[in-house]
Amino acid sequence: MLFEPFVARSLRLANRAVMAPMTRSRAVDGNTPDALMAEYYGQRASAGLIVTEGTSPSPNGLGYPRIPGLFNEVQLRGWQLVTDAVHAQGGKIVVQLMHTGRVTQIANLPPGAEVVGPAAATCPGEMFTDANGMQPHTTPRAMTEADIAHAVGEFAQAARLAMQAGFDGVELHAANGYLIEQFLNPLVNTRTDAYGGSIAGRNRFALEVAGAAAQDIGADKVGIRLSPYGVFNGTGAFPEVDAQYLSLVRELSTLGLLYVHQLDHSAMGAPPVPPALKAQLRGAFKGAYILAGGFDAASAEKALTEGQADLIAFGRPFLANPDLLARMRSGATLNAPEMGTFYTPGAKGYTDYPAMAA
């Protein structure tokens, strides 16, 4: 089934393999995509769907060095290079909108930007900066309701810019401990107002962002990535986690979103998402359902055949194998990823992974 076409609302996909979003830190000039990034994504256009690396809708969300943004005209034009390259190869691509929130070091932000989050609690650990190496995360300012409304508007504006840049849709990054998940998780969100304190309160920001994007570009062009039971960036499971995510996904389904992209970090040592919850979330959502987390060709085929998902996302295999689908079809050996070049500028470990000989 992996190599069969699939139709997901507004998208007609050549196969059921998704290239997962992966930060690569190559947007070296003004957080703007360039010809090298266009080459990278164009090389991987045989994926049924590409989800770009996390892309900030706001200057405040540029928490990592050299990650791309989508909040101005220059960045829009840079992304047009990418979408043109992918579409020229017959591929489909959506942009992942990622606001890092408190997962930020102020040295990585442009002048005038600030670190914000649902509460004034510092993210544990450190963040790399180009200027000073590893540094502690910066303590965020707790967002006011006006700040929250502004952030919702930034996501909506980025969704509109994505359509102008030629993307086939957007994915809202509500996983891995970034801003949307910071509101979802009570270990981070200690608010007692309308944006915290209960399942409905913690879900509110995510639903407002999804609703605003859906209103502006159409719900059939909006997906969302979730990571219940994830532990990145000071998150983790909590007593109401199953009930909260089930409630969230039911409401996202009511909005008519394109897909839910559910991430399981157990392949990287985190607790697994219980199979029962995965099945409940899939049953609660009426659009396409993507599973991600440690899949190879065999386990992907098994998950699809058993109806666990409609699409399967692959991360590092796509990073190191621009022709991943061809290699999987033929049973060829995969290139191994070079971890030392995951986040370094330039072509090495980026566009120089070899394809199979013709």
Image (cartoon, rainbow, N blue to C red):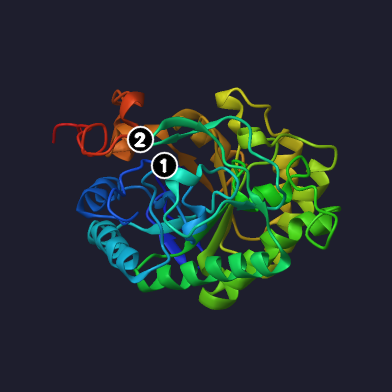
Query: Which of these two is toward me, 85 or 56?
Result: 56
Query: Which of these two is toward me, 191 or 209?
Result: 191
How many numbered circles does the render carry? Answer: 2
**Would you say the residues marked 2 and 1 are in contact, meaning their CB atoms lie under 8 Å apart?**
yes
Is 204 situated left or right of 40 in this image?
right
- Picture layout, residue 132 above or below residue 240: above
- Residue that badge 1 annotates: 23
* Tag shown at residue 186: none
Q: Residues within 10 Å of mark 1 (few under 14, many from 20)?
A: some
**Alpha carbon distance from label 2 to label 1:** 7 Å
In the rendered view of the protein, which quadrant contains the C terminus?
top left
In the image, what residue occupies the spot 83% across and 47% down?
A: 243
- Picture layout, residue 67 above or below residue 207: above
- Tag 1: residue type? Thr
- Tag 2: residue type? Tyr
Q: Residues within 10 Å of mark 2 (few under 14, many from 20)?
A: some
Residue 301, image x, y percentages: 50, 36
* Mark 2, secondary structure of its residue: loop
Query: Which of these two is toward me, 287 or 5?
Result: 287
Residue 31, image x, y percentages: 35, 54
Look at the image and tell me whether residue 17 can be seen. Answer: no
- Residue that badge 2 annotates: 343
Is 182 situated left or right of 326 in this image?
right
In the image, what residue occupies the spot 57% across and 71% down?
A: 153
